[in-house]
Amino acid sequence: MSTIEQEMVHAAEGGHHDDHELPFIRKYIFATDHKMIAKQFLFVSLFFLVIGGLLAMMMRWQLGYPGEPMPGGMMLPDAMMAPTPDGAIMLPEFYNSLVTMHGTIMIFFAIMPLLVGLFGNLLIPLQIGAEDMAFPRLNMISFWLAVPAGILMLASFAVEGGAAGSGWTSYAPLSASGEWTGVYLGQQLWLASLTILGFSSLVGAVNYITTVINMRAPGMTWFRMPLPTWALFVTAILILLAIPVLAGALIMLLFDQTIGTGFFRPEVGGEPLLWQHLFWFFGHPEVYILILPAMGIASEVLSNRARKPIFGYHSMVMAIIGIGFLGWIVWGHHMFMSGMNPLLGTSFMISTMAIAVPSAIKTFNWLATIWKGDLHLDSPMLYALAFVSMFIIGGLSGIFMASSPVDIYIHDTYFIVAHIHYVLFGGSLFAIFAGITFWFPKMFGRMMNETLNKVHFGLTIVLYNMVFWPMHNLGVQGMMRRIYDFTQYEYLAPLQPMNQFISISVFLLVAAQSVYAFNFFWSIFRGEKASNNPWDSNTLEWTVPSPPPHGNFPEMPVVYRGPYEYSSPESETDFYPQTKPPSKPPVQELIPEPVTPTPEGF
Amino acid sequence: MNWSWMLPPSFSTVSGDIDGIYMVILWITGIIFFITEALLFYFIFKYRHKEGRKAAYDHGSTKMEIAWTMVPLVIVLWISVVSKGVWDTVKVDVPPAGLEIIVTGKQFEWTVTYPGPDGALGTSDDFETLNELHAPEDEAVVITLRSEDVLHSFFLPEMRIKQDAVPGRDITVWFEAIQPGDYTIGCAELCGIGHTTMGGTLTVYTAADFQAWSSSQAQQQQP
């Protein structure tokens, strides 16, 4: 018996213990149950989402009202704010920290753990019919590495010199020595924190990949897997290959900072562009790590709520894999202006343009999925439709910067800021709202309040566009990003009203999230009790109680068909669960695969 | 508030081509944007749940998949081909220099070094300006871009020129202005606490005026 099999058997045995046998600390703190770990990631990421939002509000105060005293600013230390008789004015070094930490926290501590930590843990075992992850203890370690990483990141605000201030990309040499920024320990904590978080992601990725390959239930062939699981599987492969590159670069930069090596410091023979190559070789796959699971979630919700099979399941899977491959050869489009050989720019432009194609395939398939559907426009569907709508904008704006000559002008402007937020907020975060709302009953056994969700959706979609749409216009006017006081430039000074409009919209947008937060916590305790399958869904997680018991499946499920057989003529209802034996005598292709699933179906 | 998607006016020999590609992409993406969003809203309205509605049982169509793979592919490859020509003009094929200068970024200022009356850089009659770049119109100004400390990005928005300055590297960047006037120099790469103040002015003269300015500067800065 191989080690993996032994682990699996062990996990399976562990899974049959009853809940009440576990002491509090094993059930809620050092939990090994994938569902509990998913919830742990959920709560921690939501906390960081709030922190990231507050940082954005402070940043937007300075941009909307440059040099004016910030309300509540007197509560912050003098290292961040300059006290005046009228109130406290933000210091440029603190602004740079805000820019850096907003990006870092949102990407690494909010969106990534929500998509990968929450949905990866929650959905993979449940959707493939496994009792738990392949390595439950490794799973626990993954979460408990993320926690100290988060604490270190937050602690860096309190150290001398403040938090890291060289952007979430931490371009060397600015980041390689405190002499350029005045930030010594803050930058080192940033590097240490992300290195630890990288190990957390790596451990998680190994677990997801092993689980998907080895623990699929009988009949769960590769092409019967639900799309969120497909997306999370490809995402885990991207993490496995990308994070070591980042970790290497982070450690090299940490050595440059602390023990005087010169990997990226030109004064001792280092090469600043090496950092950019390493960072973006990780960083571009990272972009797809942040969008592929969102695409999977949106596909699931759209198909279910349209009561219609996903249009082009195979091409959806191929597009996920295609994006996963192409994602490795486009990193140079972040570096068109970096000083790398301009001939290289052309090849990166062509590969970048090519990656628009699988994105287009997915978009058209989503549109075709709702075409001739029976659309149940409840809140998960609204969030998923918003995802499609906003992803179209984010995808199309990407074409501008993919064209290297156009990028000459819009690179490092607010056009880029608009683009990334259309993909990461309009895309990923709306899909996260869809996913949390959709799987809330499975996680907590209760439904979220539909009215409050619709209020939240309405406010968020409007305010979100009021914030990020005009950023395109700012970029077109030439406003640079990461700039403390744009009014220093004469040609940018007339953009102040628009910046103020954006800032006010941000304050309202963040405030509107309290509706969701309230609904979330209220529904955990007071929401309407959920049945096993409130959305009439086909996939395996809806065949077990809400929330599922430890070990998930009382008996091994057997899978007879693909996950999106909605409105099938073979079924009396408009859904046809994957586990329901066929009513007609089985034809050849409906016979389940052998009991031990193998990767052969790939 | 300016909600326009039109680029502000530009004044270099390459800027018209760059703005042209921008407009082409704006049209293409604009049309796709309106069609896809309109379809989305139309489907949401038309197929919203009603009593008795039954969704079609439809798994897809290979023909349609091929269509919406090939059409976007052709469009983006065409954009790439058009873009490549302009990219090469701006970044690869540097024309013969009418004026050669050195621009050096350091926290938080731009130093511009001009050849003196002998027309050659690196000689004793070179002279400098701080946060000002003076150039003649209709001449290719070829810049050797350097940095003394961290990354900066030399940004001439009206000329549609942007290039990072990297310590340890000499990077060639060029532009040719087509109209005298005062324009903006910016730093587009976060370079530290004073990043926001790292601006300057590009002054473009007629050929004769530039000669006059250049000789007077050379005289004033004689050691």
Image: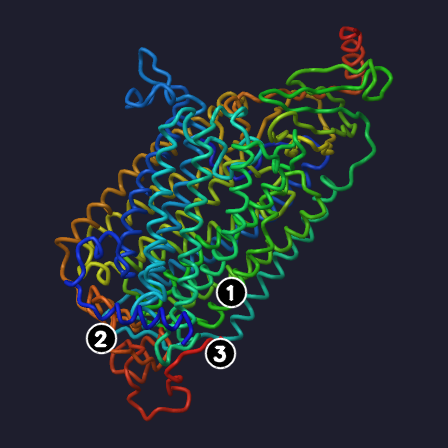
Q: Amino acid at mark 2?
A: Pro
Sequence order check, earlier mark of 1 and 3:
1
The residue indicated by pointer 3 is: A600
Q: Label 3: how many residues lie within 10 Å, few (<14), some (14-19) or many (20+)?
A: few
The residue indicated by pointer 2 is: A554
Asked if residue B13 can be seen in this view, the reply is yes
Relative to A321, A511 lies left or right = left
In the image, is residue A13 above or below residue A207?
below
Relative to A45, B220 lies left or right = right
What's the mark number on residue B145? none
In the image, is residue B17 above or below residue B64?
above
Question: Which residue does the image show at 32% across and 35% down from the upper left?
Answer: A54
Sequence order check, earlier mark of 2 and 3:
2
Question: Which residue does the image show at 51% across and 20% down from the upper left?
Answer: A488
Image coords of residue B196 (percent x, y): 52, 24
The residue indicated by pointer 1 is: A321
In the image, is residue B106 above or below residue A460?
above
